[in-house]
Image (cartoon, rainbow, N blue to C red):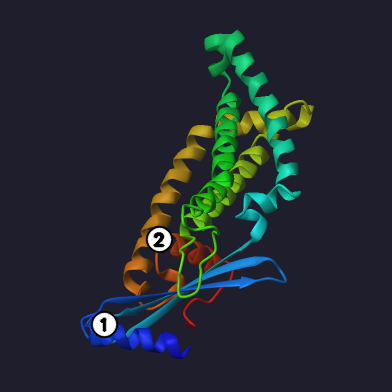
């Protein structure tokens, strides 16, 4: 704590921090040896022209086996590799079907969702391996460990961003797989009528969804521009969209 204050004072004395500073970032890195978890915290302190000071806190945590390949190969990653191999076999079968059917393959609308789903799987696998690649790059000579030494700070932003992209791609893929259930409901006679009715109304449904997205993004942009500098949960477009959705369910963001 004393050393941190001394560093802030050094920046102030050398005019890196003064009354004209717009924002100050303080990055912290923690490691819990008992739980084998790495946590990266970023405190953003914004200083507006009106002398208002607004702090924001961003915390990212990850187990060690999600960052170090040597730890992942001890068990957690092996099961995922087995699942990836099974999915790869399905992708090969889909490519073979596309090759045999030719142009007729693209007539079926459900095949597009299958292609998107397989593409998301490939993307999620790449993002799953991205943290390992980044952490491995930290072993460059003369460094012998991906962890910071004394009086050193290493940013793991790229590793955590890869993990977040992996989770987002997997979540979207799960949603697409849920939508594809309607494809198999057609084998049930009374559900076939529902699926056919939704297919006939697809143009109207998509038109309504597009208008709803445009209106929603208008509210998101308005809240972010008006209150983003005062409320932490409205600090960017992504958080504003999630916050407005939670407000529909009863969440009160204005207590901040």
Q: Quadrant of residue 79?
A: top right
Crowdedness of circle 2 by 10 Å Cα count: few (<14), some, many (20+)?
some
Q: Which residue is mark 1?
A: 17
Q: Tell me residue 42's x, y (percent).
A: 46, 72
Q: Using the numbered discs, state the Cα–Cα distance from disc 2 to disc 1 in whole angstroms.
A: 28 Å
Q: Tell me residue 247's x, y (percent).
A: 53, 69
69 or 160: nearer the viewer = 69
Q: Earlier in the sequence, mark 2 or mark 1?
A: 1
Label 1 SS: loop
Q: What residue is drawn where x is 40% and y is 61%? A: 237
Q: Tell me residue 253's x, y (percent).
A: 49, 76
Vertical placement of residue 79 versus 138, above or below: above
Instruction: Confirm or deny contact between disc 2 and disc 1 (CB under 8 A).
Output: no
Q: Is 234 on the left-hand or right-hand side of 41?
A: left
Vertical placement of residue 138 versus 99, above or below: below
Q: Tell me residue 134's x, y (percent).
A: 50, 50
Q: Which residue is mark 2?
A: 237
Q: What residue is drawn where x is 67% and y is 41%? A: 178
Vertical placement of residue 131 versus 180, above or below: below
Q: What residue is drawn where x is 26% and y is 76%? A: 22
Label 2 SS: helix
249 or 90: nearer the viewer = 90
């Amino acid at each position: 704590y004393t050393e941190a204050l001394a560093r802030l004072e050094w920046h102030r004395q050398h005019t890196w921090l003064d009354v004209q500073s717009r924002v100050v970032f303080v990055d912290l890195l923690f490691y819990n040896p008992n739980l084998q978890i790495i946590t990266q915290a970023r405190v953003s302190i914004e200083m507006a022209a009106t002398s208002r000071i607004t702090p924001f806190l961003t915390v990212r945590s990850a187990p060690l086996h999600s960052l170090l390949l040597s730890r992942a190969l001890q068990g957690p990653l092996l099961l995922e590799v087995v699942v990836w191999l099974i999915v790869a076999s399905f992708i090969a079968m889909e490519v073979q079907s596309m090759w045999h059917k030719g142009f007729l393959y693209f007539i079926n609308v459900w095949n597009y969702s299958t292609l998107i789903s397989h593409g998301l799987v490939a993307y999620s696998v790449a993002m799953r391996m991205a943290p390992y690649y980044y952490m491995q790059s930290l072993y460059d000579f003369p460094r012998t460990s991906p962890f910071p030494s004394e009086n050193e700070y290493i940013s793991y932003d790229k590793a955590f961003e890869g993990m977040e992209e992996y989770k987002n791609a997997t979540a979207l893929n799960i949603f697409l797989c849920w939508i594809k259930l309607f494809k198999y409901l057609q084998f049930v006679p009374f559900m076939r009528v529902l699926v056919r009715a939704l297919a006939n109304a697809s143009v109207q449904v998509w038109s309504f969804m597009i208008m709803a997205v445009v209106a929603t993004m208008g509210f998101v942009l308005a809240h972010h521009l008006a209150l983003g500098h005062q409320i932490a949960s409205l600090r960017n477009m992504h958080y504003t969209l999630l916050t407005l959705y939670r407000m529909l369910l009863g969440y009160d963001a204005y207590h901040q």
